[in-house]
Image (cartoon, rainbow, N blue to C red):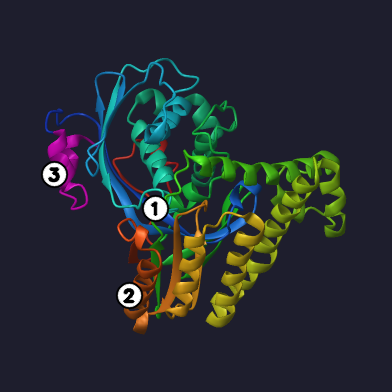
């Protein structure tokens, strides 16, 4: 597909971006991209530990147009904020801030190939709340990675084609770009400095309209789908407490990840399980819950570390084996009281055992429930961010207004940066004009 082809399609979601590309020739290869954020209903910090989670794509999204250019530079222009970036692709340097995400994508996708002779210009805009737990940063990484397939050396990278053959594997690979882990024959790197998993990227790519997906992460796979109930609405409350992954929140997040990896790694060392993650551990025939304390004692460096390891295990175990299975049953039987109770249990464990809550998100959950929601929980990495709530359609408007009012009265300092809105499970990534190697990796 060329830039002229995209102009002639007159897709409403990219029309306002096309004037920003008028200096480029209509014959240049081009793609139109729509990349959503995501909402995590259940599965707090489970993906990188090989667990399961219930997620959906958001209707909040980034839209963009990527066009091949004649010099090896990745040019980006955010039409919402006015920020620009020009990233040399020979080779791509490591960068900080929001630039870290396109930089990480370029470094990984152009590894093991000759220096490119062409580049790409990406113009985009978005309405995913930033640093709010709705995966705006992972959406930016996905958007960047997709755009870079305009560069022939990326699309023809032999190590990419041998390591990433399916949409599920592509989701996992995008997570590895962000975390910096090796993937197949593609050597890892520094990523963006966050030792996470693939939950965000999976929801972003694999989302389906008005469906919630149950996904597993060792390996990435869709395990089940749930139709969104017609008599319920999805509400989101953004606390206004930023949880950017480039701040101290990164260290706290990585500590939770490291605790999980130590536990899964020690069990794998003893029993030969693979991959060395807690999800594989609790599914192993060799797993005996009564021996977990012995496992922890073998690797703990002190009393505080021992407690932290136990809490990390307990939260993961109960989230994956008690809360989520029970929530699935409650959802499918329409028992929303039981569903709400299980969601509240997940929230309680996040505060007590995972330790990733702040007063604002705790109170947001409480206020949603007292305002009439049937269920509510924080989501995302934590340490700030947002809360989702489910309310009956016939009084959802009232619930949202009460929720917003109660929060702004209690936390007036966050009035300007907080946000309350309706969302719903939306479609995953949409790509118009994907080159063949990319098209085969999309759902």
Q: CA distance from mark 2 to mark 3?
A: 42 Å
Q: Residue at x 52, y 65 (%)?
A: 362
Q: Which residue is mark 3?
A: 8
Camera-near label (2 vs 1) is 2
Q: Is residue 4 above or below residue 199?
A: above
- Compare marks 1 and 3 and give the one earlier in the sequence: 3
The span shown in magenta is 1-21
Q: Which mark is residue 37?
A: 1
Would you say 305 lies left or right of 109 here? right
- Compare marks 2 and 3 and give the one earlier in the sequence: 3
Q: Residue at x 63, y 47 (%)?
A: 256
**Element class at badge 1:** strand
Would you say 108 lies left or right of 147 here? right
Q: Quadrant of the N terminus?
A: top left
**Element class at badge 2:** helix
Main SS of the magenta segment? helix
């Amino acid at each position: 597909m060329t830039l002229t082809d995209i102009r002639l399609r007159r897709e409403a979601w990219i029309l306002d971006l096309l004037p920003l590309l008028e200096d480029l020739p209509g014959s240049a290869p081009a793609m139109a991209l729509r990349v959503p954020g995501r909402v995590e209903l259940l599965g707090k910090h489970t993906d990188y530990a090989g667990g399961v989670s219930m997620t959906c794509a958001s209707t909040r999204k980034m839209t963009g147009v990527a066009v091949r250019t004649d010099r090896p530079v990745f040019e980006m222009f955010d039409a919402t904020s006015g920020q620009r970036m020009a990233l040399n692709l020979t080779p791509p340097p490591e960068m900080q801030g929001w630039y870290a995400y396109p930089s990480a994508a370029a470094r990984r996708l152009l590894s093991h190939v000759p220096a490119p002779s062409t580049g790409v210009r990406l113009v985009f805009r978005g309405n995913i709340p930033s640093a709010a737990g709705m995966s705006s940063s992972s959406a930016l990484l996905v958007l960047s990675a997709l755009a870079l397939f305009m560069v022939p050396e990326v699309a023809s990278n032999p190590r990419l084609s041998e390591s990433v053959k399916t949409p599920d594997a592509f989701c996992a690979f995008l997570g590895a770009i962000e975390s910096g882990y090796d993937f197949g024959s593609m050597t890892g790197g520094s990523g963006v400095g966050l030792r996470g998993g693939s939950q965000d990227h999976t929801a972003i790519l694999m989302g389906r309209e008005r469906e919630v997906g149950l996904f597993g992460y060792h390996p990435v796979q869709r395990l089940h789908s749930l139709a969104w109930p017609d008599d319920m609405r999805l509400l989101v409350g953004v606390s206004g407490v930023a949880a950017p992954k480039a701040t101290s929140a990164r260290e706290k997040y990585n500590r939770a990840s490291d605790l999980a990896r130590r536990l899964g790694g020690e069990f794998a060392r003893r029993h030969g399980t693979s991959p060395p993650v807690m999800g594989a551990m609790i599914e192993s025939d060799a797993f005996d819950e009564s021996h977990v304390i012995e496992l922890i004692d073998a690797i703990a460096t002190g009393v505080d570390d021992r407690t932290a390891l136990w809490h990390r295990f307990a939260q993961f175990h109960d989230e994956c084996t008690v809360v989520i299975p029970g929530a699935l049953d409650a959802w499918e039987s329409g028992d929303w009281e039981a569903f709400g109770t299980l969601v509240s249990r997940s929230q309680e464990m996040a505060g007590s055992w995972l330790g990733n809550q702040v007063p604002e998100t705790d109170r947001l959950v409480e206020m949603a429930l007292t305002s009439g929601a049937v269920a509510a929980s924080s989501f995302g990495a934590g340490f700030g961010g947002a809360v989702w709530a489910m309310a009956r359609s016939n009084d959802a408007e009232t619930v949202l207004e009460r929720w917003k009012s109660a929060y702004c009265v209690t936390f007036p300092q966050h009035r300007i940066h907080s946000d309350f809105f309706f969302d719903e499970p939306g479609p995953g990534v949409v790509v118009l004009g994907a080159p063949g190697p990319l098209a085969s990796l999309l759902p």
